[in-house]
Amino acid sequence: MPSILLLGSGFVADPCLSYLLKRDNNKVTVAARRVANVESLIAGRPNASAIALDVNDDAALEAAVAKHDLVISLIPYTHHARVIKAAIKHRKHVVTTSYISPAMMELDQAAKDAGITVMNEIGVDPGIDHLYAIKTIDEVHSLGGKITSFTSYCGGLPAPECSNNPLGYKFSWSSRGVLLALRNNAKCLVDGKVLDIAGPELMNSAKNIPIYPAFAFEGYPNRDSTPYNERYHIPEAKTVIRGTLRYAGFPNFIKALVKLGFLDDKEVPQLAATAAPVQWRHLLSQAAGVKFTSVDDLEAAVKKTANISGDDGERIIFGMKWLGMFTETNVHLRGTMLDTLCATLEDKMMYAPGERDMVMLQHRFGVEFPNGKKEIRTSTGLWFGVPNGDSAMATTVGVPCGIATQLILDGKISRKGVIAPMDKEINNPIMEALEKEGIFMVDEIIA
């Protein structure tokens, strides 16, 4: 029986495990710090078992890796290099859904020497996005055309009927991680020029992203898009942007919070856990640089400090009131403005039972052929979660991960070293299996 060690028991683990256990001869060991965290995941699955494992304990990690044929690492990416080193030592394959980090790439030759496959970037973004980008690019190149521009936007969002809050967003994990990502710098290629966007300016770069008329989306660049000319084999492209999708209004609301200092993670003595209680309206007054006298005066001060006005300003004020920021409610004392805000967001903006999420992904290609003909090609995927079941995000990350694992075990993906799905030899079998699971993108050509 092929034996698989699955590190991590979060949301993604369930659809990954479900896919792998479709094969009666697969045996999966799920490892987490505490076995209790895994009991519900393996319940009713005779070919699944659980062990307690601290991945920071090298001896324990190596012992667990040595007993299996392949390791899936669904734990934070900072641990992947440690896992890969253990796998190299014991000549075991590895699969992750994470971007290949420099620390992981340093192990490429050692992985090749050990004769193992270390497959990465095989979730949704990264993952499914790579598969369908490469597909269209190869089709255009095979026809003698060139890709003049490539833009790709992906968002994990609440389904429309569940987007009932000021940000149009809900958290299935730590809100802190989501908000901290909004402070990251971004880099992309626009009309042949590299555009560097400083973290504080990221929300200013947001623009309308029309995909379907039923949705109002805005998008902004994510991370560094500039390596994708090379990674996607499109040196001819003058514009290359990979970005994040949010519902319209999200960027401006975040900009207002930034201007008020609510994304600062510096320690504030007033917000220490041992400090005296602080009302939201007094904390907001402090952020706006005034002393609280009335809600109307505070509203005016917030508009001035956050530089908001008109209908958009009214919407943002309404959203802050919805969050309780103008009330006498005491804040959760978490030490920083960021963590204090996050505590309230997690109180009010988590997914409720029966609610569903969605994942929206679209590539847009500018295409030009030798005869001068130009086209716009799109590749679009929209997936919804199952109420009280697996989320769309978990499914579109976990199933591709499971498929890649199975293909490695079956010998259909045999390339050695630290790899990602960047060519049809690897991608086509994954896409074929994904389509059997109902996960695919729809291609269109707009003349």
Image (cartoon, helix red, strand yellow):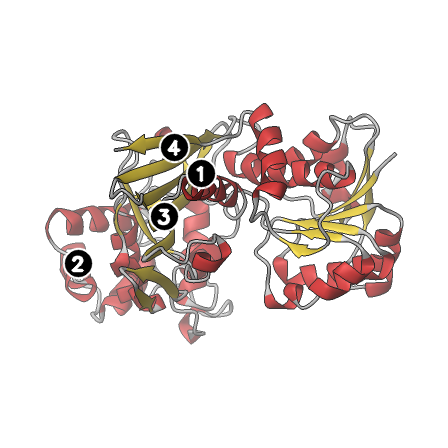
Real-space Cα separation, disc 3 to disc 4, in angstroms: 41 Å
- Please report the residue visible at 64 percent of the width from the left and 44 percent of the height from the top: 10
Q: Which residue is mark 3?
A: 146
Mark with earlier residue (3, 2): 3
Q: Would you call the spot at circle 4 few (<14 residues within 10 Å), some (14-19), or many (20 or more)? A: some
Q: Secondary structure at mark 2?
A: loop
Is 187 situated above or below 443? below
293 left or right of 108 in image: left
- The amino acid type of the residue labelled 3 equals Lys
Q: Secondary structure at mark 1?
A: helix
**Quick one: 57 or 98, which is closer to the camera?**
98
Q: Which residue is mark 1?
A: 139
Label annotation for residue 294: 2
Q: Would you call the spot at circle 2 few (<14 residues within 10 Å), some (14-19), or many (20 or more)? A: few
**Quick one: 108 or 143, which is closer to the camera?**
143
- The amino acid type of the residue labelled 2 equals Ser
Looking at the rendered image, the disc whose residue lies closer to the viewer, 2 or 4, is 4
**Quick one: 145 or 215, which is closer to the camera?**
145
On the image, which quarter does residue 435 sit in?
A: top right
Mark with earlier residue (4, 1): 1
Label annotation for residue 162: 4
